[in-house]
Amino acid sequence: MHLGKALAEPTYSSYLQIGRLLELQRPLSAPEHPDELHFIVTHQAMELWFKVMIHELTRVQQYIAEQSWTQAITKMRRVNAILTAQTAQMDTLGSLDPQSFLGFRRFLGSASGFQSVQFWALELLGGIRDPAYLNQLRRSYDGDLPPILAKIVAAPSLAETASNAPRAAGTGDWFDVYANPECHGPLFLLGEELIEYDRRWFIWREEHMLLVERIIGPGQHGTGGRSSHYLQHRLHHRCFPFIWDVRNRVTETAATQGTETDLTVTGAIHRSNGTHLSQQA
Ligand code: HEM
């Protein structure tokens, strides 16, 4: 039977919708500034990668809840690789000099990365949700979060799911995992990927801040009205403080026990009270 064109083999172009994709870069400067195309593509690429990161982090959360450690670890590793690749892509804008940016900046109005809903989705999904932060975010949306953000806030964060993971798996808490990595291999490796996520965001934020200072100057305000001081303040947001904190506790416990050697060998650590960690998410 001849099935006709509808079921024809996809081509590279039809599968990836290249025609539509390449239609989406619309510089606003008039006459068109030759550096604006690069500026647009860098931001569009960021949004595409954010989309994949949200998708993958949602899966990671599900895998952790199901205790499918191999999947959780490999997908978290993918997210981390994307974050590093994205930081490198942002670096390509280091080639935009101040004068060239001024050539098209006024056409952007108050449009800013600060208005990236997917950026906030990533932060909220990860677990950055303290009340001051949420209030500030609500204010920036005149009180009502966009549906995608409201839906994320209504559900547990990845940090909450991860924080409870060792207990749910019946293996103590994160302190036990880090005190005895050999006994808790999958959870330990997951913890290392989670801390890597926070670390790579720190690098992203730092690189972005330096890019901003390089292009508009450290004392200037962005199109969204904020300065590099604001970006400096945001450097230290972490999704998984309990994975950082557990390192403090391992180090402090070793110091109290008078040993800084292998805790599992010395038997210095058996259990922890656990409350400290579960309160952190
Ligand atoms: C000419 C280059 C850039 C300048 C001058 C710049 C400037 C700024 C400034 C000053 C802010 C704070 C809010 C504001 O006042 O606008 C900001 C926020 C932001 N920018 Fe950029 N940016 C640039 C490029 C980029 C690129 C390439 C990306 C992504 C690949 C990006 C993503 C973001 C995001 C996600 C935020 C929100 C960050 C937060 O609130 O913590 N920006 N940008």
Image (spheres, helix red, strand yellow):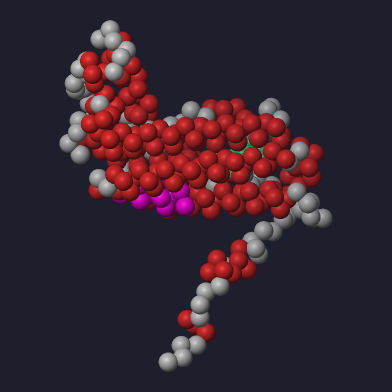
Q: Is 259 or 170 nearer to us in this picture?
A: 259
User: Would residue 199 be found to the left or right of residue 246 on screen?
Assistant: right
Q: Is residue 175 above or below residue 142?
A: above
Asked if residue 11 can be seen in this view, the reply is: yes
Q: Residue at x 18, y 21 (%)?
A: 270
User: Would residue 74 be found to the left or right of residue 12 on screen?
Assistant: left
Q: Quadrant of the N terminus?
A: bottom left
User: Would residue 116 be found to the left or right of residue 252 on screen?
Assistant: right
Residue 253 position by quadrant: top left
Q: Residue at x 48, y 43 (%)?
A: 81
Hey, which residue is sitting farthest bottom in the picture? 1
Q: Residue at x 54, y 33 (%)?
A: 203
Asked if the magenta segment contains residue 129, the reply would be no
Q: Is residue 218 above or below residue 90?
A: above
Asked if residue 160 can be seen in this view, the reply is: no
Q: Is 9 or 20 nearer to us in this picture?
A: 9
Instruction: Look at the magenta stretch and give its main secondary structure.
Output: helix
State which region is magenta: 52-62
